[in-house]
Amino acid sequence: MSDAPVHTLTELSVEHMDSPLGVATARPRFGWRTESAARDLLQSAYELVVTTGGRPVWESGRVPAPDGVGIEYGGLDLASRTRYDWRVRTWLRGREEPSAWAEATFETSLLRTADWQARWVVPDQEPTLHEQYSLTGALSGAEGPTTPPAERLRPPLHLRQRFTVAGGVRRARLYATARGVYEAELNGRVVGDEVLAPGHDSYPHRLSFQTYEVSELLTEGANVLGLTVADGWWAGRIGLTGSSANYGDRLGAIWQLEIEHEDGSVTTVVSGDDVRAAVGPRRYADLFIGEHHDATRELPGWSTPAFDDSGWRPVTVEDGGLDVLTPFAGEPVRRTREFRPERVLTTPAGDTVVDLGQVIAGRLRIAVSAPRGTVVTLEHSEVLTADGDYFSNILGPNKDQTDHYVAAGRPGEVFEPTFTFHGFRYVRVTGLPQVRVEDVTAVVIGSDLRETSRFATSDPRIDRLHQNVLWSQRANFLSIPTDCPQRERAGWTGDLQVFAPAAATNMDVRQFVERWLDNVRADQLDDGQVPIIVPVIPSIAQDDGAGIGTTSAGWSDAVVIVPWVLYERYGDVRPLRANYGAMTRWVEHQMREAEAGLPPRLADRELAPEQEARQRLLWNTGFHFGDWLAPSTLLESPMPDSVMIAPQRTGELVAAMFHAHSLRLVAEVAAILGHTDDAARYRDRFARVRAAFAAEYVAPDGRLPVEMQGLYVVALAFGLVPDDRRAAALKHLVALVHANDDHLDTGFVSVPYLLDVLWEGGERDLARRLLRQDTAPSWLYAVDRGATTIWEAWTAIAPDGTVSPMSMNHYAFGCVDDWMFRRIAGLQPVEPGYRRSRIEPDLDADVDVVSAAHDTPHGRLSIDWRRSGDTVSVEVTVPHGTVAELALGGAVEHVGSGSHRRTVVHRRAQVESRSTTV
Ligand code: RAM
């Protein structure tokens, strides 16, 4: 049979990137998608060839495989700094002819420590002042700096190295990193478009370096490489306490420039004792405090050969420090978008305030036309007071978020800070007689991830909610996944645990999250403990009496749940394999802790042996954040004391439940990876923990010992309520919601499951009503108050307009976005990576039009549905290589790839009470 190929291959990727430079592994994964005008196409096999310089290094032969997701390189380890070509073709089920070959390239970075000939250079410098504040002291305002930043902070440094290049450059790569954050220049031009390199890592264990293509920046003859290095995460003030010098107190840098000539010879320029250093125009630059840039002190041409550096100081060259160097994997932090502010306003207090109209992470670029020496000050915040005045919503030491610029008095002068960023919507500008909208650009920065979702409905408020989630993700996926982009910027493990499914819907987060998981493993303690913040912030990890431990249920469990989400959403087992050891060490730690102690309320009681045995299965001791920020607990006493009520009241149960959940997931992972003994052992342990939980915590009438919505939600979601008590437990949950006037009362760990638990329990109207509720606490409450991102707490702005000093940009509660995709639009993964999906839109939803899409690893899965009267027209697109169950109006049909249109007659179920707008 000879049938012409009907398909082509597109979107070829290596480690999820398009023709990447600086591939960070010797065993990369390949990917591709099938493109065709035909339908119902399923891949049956592929053949992949990798070559370098025309020589094959791996020929896979024809390999049966259902898709092109996470196809692992199978040859000998790849070499460093090498360009590879690769090609792939595939066969489809039921067809003889393969596709044409599709081709792409990639290049490896320096993969081995031995590749480094360079040495660390450390300029003469004042070490960063050690500022150490305790959590309690920082939060109560009792501790903090007493002098202005200019008196405490030291300046960033310019480093420069002169070198000579013979002609005929074929290609040149710069590998560079710093202790601090840096920007590289070659001959007066900035290298690349990354910002805040090298990014945040668990620096004691791994420090990323960047790979840059610099062929075009070199000239024949004299050249100069320059690096400006600032405190960054390394030495600057970070985290909740704003303590400094977390990883070190001296700036340093290392680089290796490899130049390959046309004749095949190689020149390598390495950082060494010929480097010179000087202070530049910045008096200081701190990620949290801000940047002070004095343009009158700029050194024009400092990174060009003509510049006279005779006054510059030598550097000290250090041995060692190479083993932590790790090629940066994934999408760098960039300026991802720019826009004009909405308006410039004068507040009642008379301040000039730029209003972006959108809360972002980033900074301002502003045209400064002012006489030399004029000091322009930019202060950043996320909200105004109820009266419309400037209000600094971020508490704690060193959270200034303030930039200063001293004008040089040049025409066309423009300021944008380089080594800082802020979380803000409003900027109070002082020092300029007037500020016009056209003088100002909002510069959004973040990890430059591909966005993979579209979600629009006939309800602008629901759409805004989705947009708010996206903006919170853009702001908090910045080098690492953070809780918020202003107060802490910390890799709180629980926040990502909660948000990961929504994150994976909205962006291709594979590289970004896998790199963070590399840090999680690096920071895991020998006894299996997984820290609550990764990368660990050493000044916060010290126990300072705040009563918070190293780990917490729901936070540390991220080591299990987050890789699981990656597997579920992208269908690649590698994150499971890479993290399996860490997962098992974590659950083993939980098991030891469970066996070691009893909760304080039982500690001095005489327990029956069976109860004692059950208790020793339950992980229910130690500190846990519990259902963090559950709204009713915040009303019981003033902040910040009230935040500790949820941990006290819910910590015990939340810990027991997350341990059970982690055991169940690890058992599943073990089975997928073929570790059958482990799978059986963890499955058995899960069954026993589940039984113990039921006996200890679930009363015969389905009640839990603590009557809070979130606890019922988690117990039901994790399958911990025995079948014969499920209906009763659900009833209690529903009663709690009704008793709360049909409002949620869920905190961090339960909110991801709330609507699903109600939905699956048959309480669909209640789930819909909670989503559409618009009095506090609810999602639309914030939308109605003009939120443009997701708030940290449901009532960060109270119904009476009082603005709390809280973060307006925490994505955790935005996890509902995933529910909206799965339930309103109805796009659900069934098999890992959406190889099989279910498309089941909620035709009873209180919207008439929904248009949603998600770019799965196989291609776009989409739905457009529109109601007119009782008729609903539906159009879906299913990516090639996948199948879908299309569930409409009670009927389920199986469809293959391609587009499908259906029309169903469906009278909308009566929604009992519609939300009311106040
Ligand atoms: C807050 C963080 C974060 C949360 C922890 C427990 O300070 O902002 O969101 O995970 O506390």
Image (cartoon, rainbow, N blue to C red):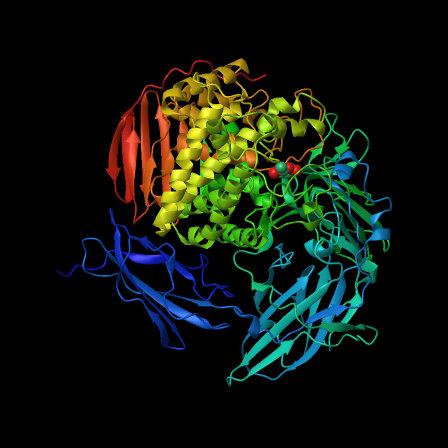
Q: Work out whether 236 lies above or below 659.
A: below
The answer to which of 4 and 691 lies nearer the viewer is 691
Q: Work out whether 620 lies above or below 88.
A: above
Inspect this view and state whether residue 95 appears: yes
106 left or right, relative to 638: left
Residue at 45% across / 51% down in the picture?
580
Q: Quadrant of the C terminus?
A: top right
900 left or right, relative to 137: left
Percent position of residue 640, x then y: 71, 30
Percent position of residue 525, x then y: 58, 51
Residue at 56% across / 38% down in the picture?
596
Percent position of residue 614, x then y: 47, 31
Q: Quadrant of the N terminus?
A: bottom left
Inspect this view and state whether residue 508 appears: no
Q: Work out whether 472 lies above or below 846.
A: below
766 left or right, relative to 221: left
Query: Among all residues in the image, which is located at the extreme left?
Result: 1
